[in-house]
Image (cartoon, rainbow, N blue to C red):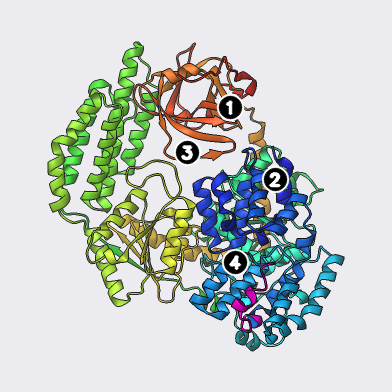
Amino acid sequence: MYELEKENLRRFSRYIVQVLRPSYIRVFLTAYLDEESVERILSEEKSSVSSAAQMLLEKMWQLEEAGWFQAFLDTLHNSEYTGLYAAVSKWDFKELEELQPFKRLLDRIEPSITKNMKPRELLAHMSDCITQRECEEIRAVEDQCGCVAASERLVASLRRSDKPWFKILKMALDTCSQKLALQLLELNTDESEKCASDDEESMGTMATVRFEYREEGESDDGLLKSINEISLADRLSEGAGVVAGVSERAEERKLREYQKELAIAAFSGQNTIICAPTGCGKTIVALAICEHHLKKFPGKAKVVFMATKVEVYEQQYKLFIQHFSKDPDVRVTGVCGEMEVCLRTVVESNDVVVLTPQCLVNALQDGELESLQVFTLLLLDECHNTTGKHPYNNIMNRYLDIKLTSTAHTLPQVVGLTASVGISSFKNQQEAEINICQLCANLDARVISTVTTHIDELRSYVHIPEKDFFEVPPRTSDPFIRIMCNIMSNIEELAKKVYNIETLSPIVNRDYGSQKYEQWIVAVQKGCKLLQLDDPEQERRVCRALFNYTEHLRKYNDALIINEDARTKDALDYLQAFIDQVRAAGYDDTERKLTAFFDAQRDQLQHLATEGQENPKLQELKFILEEEYRNNDQTRTVLFVRTRALADALKKWIDETDSLKFLKPGVLIGRGRRSSQLVGSGMTLTSQKGVLDSFKSSDQNKILIATSVADEGIDIPTCNLVLMYEYVGNVVKMVQVRGRGRAAGSRCFLISSRKERIEKEKQNMQREKIVEKAIASLQSSPEKLQAKVDLFQKNDKIKRHYMSLSPEKPRAVGSYKLLCAKCEMFACFSHDLRVLKECHHIVLDRSVFQRCATEPHHNPKSFGGITKTQKMYCKECKHDWGIIASYLSIRDLPIVKIDSFVIQNVETLQKQWYRKWRDVTFAMQEFDLTEITPETWGVRE
């Protein structure tokens, strides 16, 4: 439905995004988009109207509701978008195209004309091209900020106008005797008209606007500044040729010299890995490479820029939109995993596509894109991830298979960007060189671009923080730990009376409060799910009891981990939230015994939480923060932590500490959906952007507490203090985390009570130097690099070929039961499952509703025609089974998740547990609408 309209909206999107301001058609947004999407679009509009308009279009491409397109047209007409309404109604954008030369004229003369206009006088004569709402906004700007600001707002409105405004503006200037502004307009009219005729003769010529670059490097609110945003004095001081605007097709880019050095190999068309520190402007280099490529292959270039995370994709997509927004000949769009679009159509309709790599993998696997040869340039952000099973490596394996098996190919140029190539483990320079060569082989790169000639300039812009270590002794004695360990020991003894759990997974050392103990719990739970006894009823009781025992052990272990790094109070709050959740769910006899352990010790635990010994690590952190802000009250801090629970706990601690509460901490965590009593289910992109904006642009948040979501790719505003709270990784992570401290004189501290973590970070610092030497060695001997890359590629090709010869195991056709993973209650048979869109698994047996309980979904969302309406639980034990959804006109479809069930073969009674649907060994039919009839799918009881 509406496929033609959607296709045309894609085809003419470059015109629409230059005109449409989403907030002006808010009535359409709220009627047809979900609340979060509306919020994201309106939030984006504050920083980039064009980017917000593009986001709106992408949401519209996914709409299926009847009548949305006519509603869009009606809203355009009612909102005074008469020109855009006419263009979209007839799919004829000729009149909007004819406005382009005059908009470019405004770009060129804006700095001068805005100083010589009196907008309030002009508005009375411009009602034919400026809407009433825009007039009110311009008057408000003049009242609050003065005449020049109002003139800039007027020019912005004209630049986005869909009406023939040029003659109206000239007449208004003449009528109001604003002669200086009129002269500026008339002096450039002939040149503008020449531009118009040039455009008609050659629509393929690429218009270019010259950019200056800000000092912040990779700033979140735009890396690039147009010549119109630079003062006239600044431009004149730069000498001849600086005022070159669109009409002169200015070729130059004011890249810093070290940025040119990084880009030079890519400019020449070579496959390249660009390795440079965080904060030096690698994204700027990528934009320059992209633009150079588009000019080099006009009309033929197809560029794809890939970002590894959705959060980073949003950030980079915005930058590409901003960069090319004043060049209507370059069509830019973006695609991420949450969008339902045809990638082939997107690629055909655009010159530059920003996406997450899994989207490209899916399109290649499904045959939606024939091959990578449709592209001419691949840009891979954070390219050090091109290893193992990462989507980047999947893409490059396809690339290399074409290259190594066919002589007739037109493969794209490949450019990777990273802060460090120190991948995998290594002990010396030779091993580091092997790892780097393997990465080069994976990316088919034979050049590693680093800054060598202009290193002094790089150092003047990129400041490497001073590193220091704070080793903190652990608590001398902690009764809380003793009580927790006693309770855990008692739970283990109870579990052994039901079944000897050590036969499921033996434990060598009971190191309570450790990741090792967590791994043991996971192994025991998996063994429970597959347990088989002679008596089926006894088997169900045992499995349910063991599930409860191990789940309580897991939570006590979590509490010990929180207690180690935060306050006892935070650990107790975590446990209390879990116990309350247990009581509110399927509260059986086993769970009553387990909660009784906690209830018996609650008063003592509460006393320890309020009166017990303070955590020495928190005392050290408090001292550091107090000293830093006493010496410099403008300090900006990023505090890295390992878990979301710890991020939440440290925020509460800072908020409740009198000497620190002025810091008003912000928290930046990932978007994962796994629930947690302390931090919910992650942050939305809008929430993340709000936290970053607040941290950067105001005194509201002086400290940002972040998990690993912030250490790679996401652009955190400049700070001068980086604190790593028990936060240690590999060389790449160290380089990226340290790089968050970009201000001059910034420092980076590691706070830990574990000597092994401090030693590991010191080893990382040594390994970084080894990597630098390894790169220099390979750069000095390109033949050596080439030979190793060729060798690795041939060996990897042989391995892939051998793997492809291994026959894929056919899926069994037999009958299987899906049993609740917690209590082993029967849910459905495998032959009642249907697969929708290759990822949603629907139960067609209506009797499943007799075995499950439902409640309204707390976050009802639509995706790909499917709308979540309810959560689905086991009726017996309240274990989460999945969701109830609607699809098209069909309601009440149970969609189950495989890890909530144990799969039992009906004939052999053998049981299996799978984490993902792709791993199951039995066959499932595709979903077929003809199976849904009033007789088979009646009203749910």
**Residue beneath disc 1:** 835
Q: Amino acid at mark 1?
A: Val
**Residue beneath disc 3:** 860
Disc marking residue 134 = 4
Q: Is residue 115 magenta?
A: yes
Which is in the foreground here, disc 3 or disc 1? 3
**Residue beneath disc 2:** 6
Earlier in the chain: of badge 3 and badge 1, it is 1
Label 3, secondary structure: give it.
loop
Earlier in the chain: of badge 2 and badge 3, it is 2
Answer with left or right where residue 849 lies relative to residue 887: left
Residue 540: quarter of image: top left
**Cα distance between the residues tagged 1 and 2:** 27 Å
Residue located farthest toward the right when viewing the structure as drawn? 201
**Cα distance between the residues tagged 1 and 4:** 50 Å
Q: Is residue 534 magenta?
A: no
User: Residue 924's x, y, as percent?
Assistant: 58, 22
**Cα distance between the residues tagged 4 and 2:** 29 Å
Earlier in the chain: of badge 1 and badge 2, it is 2
Q: Amino acid at mark 4?
A: Glu
User: Residue 274's x, y, as percent?
Assistant: 61, 63
